[in-house]
Image: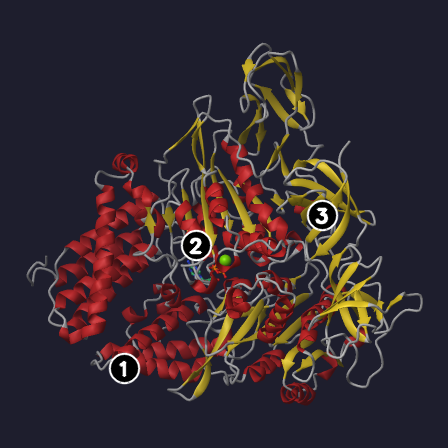
Amino acid sequence: MSTKGTVVGIVANLVTIEVDGPVAQNEICYIDLHGTKLMAEVIKIAGTQVYAQVFESTRGLYTGCAVAFTGHMLEVTLGPGMLSKSYDGLQNDLYLMSGVFLNRGEYTAALDSSARWEFTPLVEVGDEVRAADWIGEVPEGWIRHKIMVPFDYPGIGRITSIAPKGTYRVTDRIAVVVDAEGNERELTMSMRWPVKVEIKGYASKLRPFKILETGVRAIDILNPMMEGGTGFIPGPFGCGKTVLQHAISKNAEADLIVLVACGERANEVVEIFVEFPELDDPRTGRKLIERTIIVCNTSNMPVAAREASVYTGMTIAEYYRMMGLKVLLLADSTSRWAQALREMSNRMEELPGPDAFPMDLTAIIANFYARAGFVQLNNGQSGSITFIGTVSPAGGNLKEPVTEATKKAARAFYALSQARADSKRYPAIDPIDSYSKYLEYQEVVDYFDATIEPGWVGKVMRLKDMLLRGKEARDQINILGDDSVPLEYHITYHKAEVIDFTLLQQDAFDAIDASTPIKRQQYMVNKVLDVCSRSFAFDNFEEVGAFFRRIINIFRQMNYQEFMSERFRQLEAQLETVMQEREGRGVPEG
Amino acid sequence: MKARAFQKIYTHIENITKATCTVRADGVHNEEMALVAGRPAQVVKIDRDRITLQVFPGTQGIPTDAEVVFLGRPPVLTVSPDLKGRFFNAYGAPIDNGPAIEGEEREIGGPSVNPVRRKQPSELIATGIAGIDLNNTIVTGQKIPFFADPDQPFNQVMCNVALRARADVIILGGMGMSNDDYLYYRTMFENAGALDRIICFMNTTEDPPVERLLVPDMCLTAAEYFAVEHRAKVLVLLSDMTLYADALSIVSNRMDRIPSKDSMPGSLYSDLAKIYEKAAQFPDGGSITIIAVTTLSGGDITHAIPDNTGYITEGQLYLRRDTDIGKVIIDPFRSLSRLKQLVIGKKTREDHPQVMNACVRLYADAAAAKTKLENGFDLSDYDKRALEFAREYSRELLAIDINIDNDTMLDTAWRLFGKYFTRDEVAIKQELMERYWKE
Ligand SMILES: Nc1ncnc2c1ncn2[C@@H]1O[C@H](COP(=O)(O)OP(=O)(O)OP(=O)(O)O)[C@@H](O)[C@H]1O
Ligand SMILES: [Mg+2]
């Protein structure tokens, strides 16, 4: 018999329930409000008193409402048919909800139980299988969606029956497995999985070594993201976190993008709903929506479901990773998730940590980031989840708990700077403060040597040095004045500006400039390095500025042209002429 | 607010704090309204039969044997087309001596719009103010606050924007508004002949601060009624959201909640988001646009209130006094409209995005030159031209007293480019340069 209970206390979305039987931490229960069932999650147990956070508004609840416990934790349903869907934080299909407004207590199915899928078996009767083994596949859009042995299947089983090639619904029985003790288990094409538990059934997790191209130059060139890597984007409001994530989601060369809109604006998600069915995936020509799953719990949707949304997104990503896919998970913003934890912790009157966040915030964030990664599957294939989250630091101050905790967990750091955003230097990724730890990995260095050009990371480091020296030169100029510093300072400063304007700044709203393939990035890096290594002669600092502004203008025009088009070539030639006019007159600089 | 005949009356209050009282009662619902000694109150906590009520006007003078009557419903607003042209208090009761509204009772603070049912905003709102239309174009369905110090003329600007915006219904929510400002709005609306499309929910400085907490939800319930049922373009003005947040902190403090940054409740983000996210473009053509004011203290936008607001709204319009020209301007650095991309260069002239960005970039160069000057350095020729440009740009385009159309704004910008800069310095796409450059 499942446990029952009665509501005895209510504060905002925290309810206290008196129970008549056993209850598990994080168990899901439903509160009955005049026939409407409100979903809630147990977050604390004290004797027969249970505290639960309700995933809905608690308006109208009263002492005495009946509660039914389900015996399981918060789960998602995994199976074919998730691609291109838009879910809320609890995996309700938002398109199936009736009406313009979200009705409390309305829950919709994640998978279409009437849809028929073209199933092809991958095993035969008698085969031995383990958790996560592929036993069949169905085409889901362009993905060969693998039907897997449930991830919780203990030990080794033997297939005693497998459905022949044909069309089936997700709930149809497609196989029977028997274990050593003779226990039979029927398998369908779908399974349920608790979101707070990582889907493990892979052989091993490897160190990331392959670049995940994002098309954003400031990332790919200076601080590349790796397949299976982790990164985060902190920045004050309005500095471009969301625009940057959207740019990445449009252009990154992943098989599948899971976008989690966590406690942010609804209109930003609407933008995805409107654009993704229209826009082409630059690599495959298919529509972007065909490789996207959206998990959307905007800021006005219930706070507890906001916390769930990042886990729902991660679990869906893990499921597809087990099929050997390259998944990119983006969450905007992880701070809203942390705030949801804070709201609940405060209501529970727990001892608060810094800024009233729960004490275990760092551990929670670290555990979450640790679920990303590049894995080797049992069958020798590989799959990955690359995770990039945004962080919205209070007051734009990076010394706050969420940023600090995330810094410990993520390997790449893309700090957005207010000053850059103010002067419209987009994307506002600070070239000096940001880093990608992956550039230190020998396997990454080797990978770039082999796939881009030998010595690539060396070139990246040169760019970084020049940017730093440019900043130092500018500081000196600002302190000492234009006239009082050697001309070299002006030259150093302006060369850094060439790098900034040509390579780092990128117009996310221009059809051509929005995304740059790695080949073009390589070409432009070499072009810019060429400019920066040549020596030009000037009589005074005003000439320096005027000259480099011309160079920058030509480069900017080049960025707006089709790569290697006639116009691109013309501009390139013009660049050469302008440089030659200035060259050779002076002494080479050191 | 009337008690209904069959309701039970309780007369034994167990506990009284500055903002709440606790009484034992049965069958009480969360967030239900009640009257405590005739004062409006709302259930904020239930612990078995111990019910904690937040008393909006405060608890001064309430005796332990005061009458507590539960009203059996959450806060509601009676909606009908007759709301137009009327003035109400925070509880939705008329304050204009007019008749009570007959119509349907709606719970305030209702559910959110399903994100997949929203339409993408795409209808430009022209205000004539270049600091908005040129640099920070706003659209219907957007939510955007003015960030301003209390001494800046934000109410005047809001009033101008509202009257020029061609909204079908304008809803004004006053929170801690001075009586003078309230009368100013009334007079302005009246003079513009707009009273018949105005609805006002007012909490002035003379009213209890906690009552303010009801004002945004009252406004937005009315807004949803007109936008959904009447497919109206509704503009909601909320002034001042800082005072709203202050009321939140008063309540959370009196209920002994753990404060987070700047003594604000930890739920400030969610509390504000619930209000602002009501802005929407509905599928049937109606829309709710929210223009709010968040007053700053000494221009500090890192304080929790403007900070959380900035993270929620779709941009902000930052008012600043430009001492060089002696006028209040909309600061191009700190201001932003995140929805401008949806219309600029599409609903406006093709050169709009690039012109706007070039202006701001050159204005930034002028700011750098100004710093140089203040540090006692010589200015280059470029610096001097940038400074000249900035002054004229500020006077002709950034000042809040501008009222011109969009093409005129763009033409003005090109004129200033040609007057002060070379083509290389302006660095706009070649095709546009060729079409619009003015020597
Ligand atoms: N790469 C870019 N190119 C052009 N404009 C940009 C770019 N990035 C950001 N912007 C401008 O900045 C605005 C704010 O960007 P965005 O919404 O991404 O900020 P955010 O950091 O996500 O803010 P919040 O934390 O409040 O969500 C955009 O609406 C756009 O006008
Ligand atoms: Mg954002």
Relative placement, left or right, of B94 versus B136 is: right
Q: Chain of mark 3?
A: A
Q: Residue at x 76, y 59 (%)?
A: B30
Q: Compared with residue B419, is residue A408 higher up or lower down, i.e. above or below?
A: above
SS category of the residue bearing label 3: loop
Q: Amino acid at mark 2?
A: Thr
Residue A163 appears in the figure: yes
Relative placement, left or right, of B136 versus B179 is: left
Q: Chain of mark 1?
A: B
Residue topped by disc 3: A97
The mark lying in front, picked from 3 and 1, is 1
Query: Dividing the image into 4 quarters, which one contains the N terminus of chain A?
Result: top right
In the image, A250 versus B171, the foreground residue is: B171
SS category of the residue bearing label 2: helix
Please check whether the numbered discs 3 and 1 fall on a single chain.
no
Q: Residue furthest top?
A: A126
Q: Which mark is residue B374?
A: 1
Residue topped by disc 2: A403
**Cα–Cα gap, marks 2 and 3:** 36 Å
The x and y percentages for residue A241 are: 45, 56
Relative placement, left or right, of B49 versus A333 is: right
Q: Amino acid at mark 3?
A: Met
Q: Residues within 10 Å of mark 2 (few under 14, many from 20)?
A: many
Which of the 4 image quarters holds residue B355? bottom left
Q: Compared with residue B336, is residue A168 higher up or lower down, i.e. above or below?
A: above
Upstream in sequence: badge 2 or badge 3: 3
Q: Residue at x 58, y 83 (%)?
A: B155
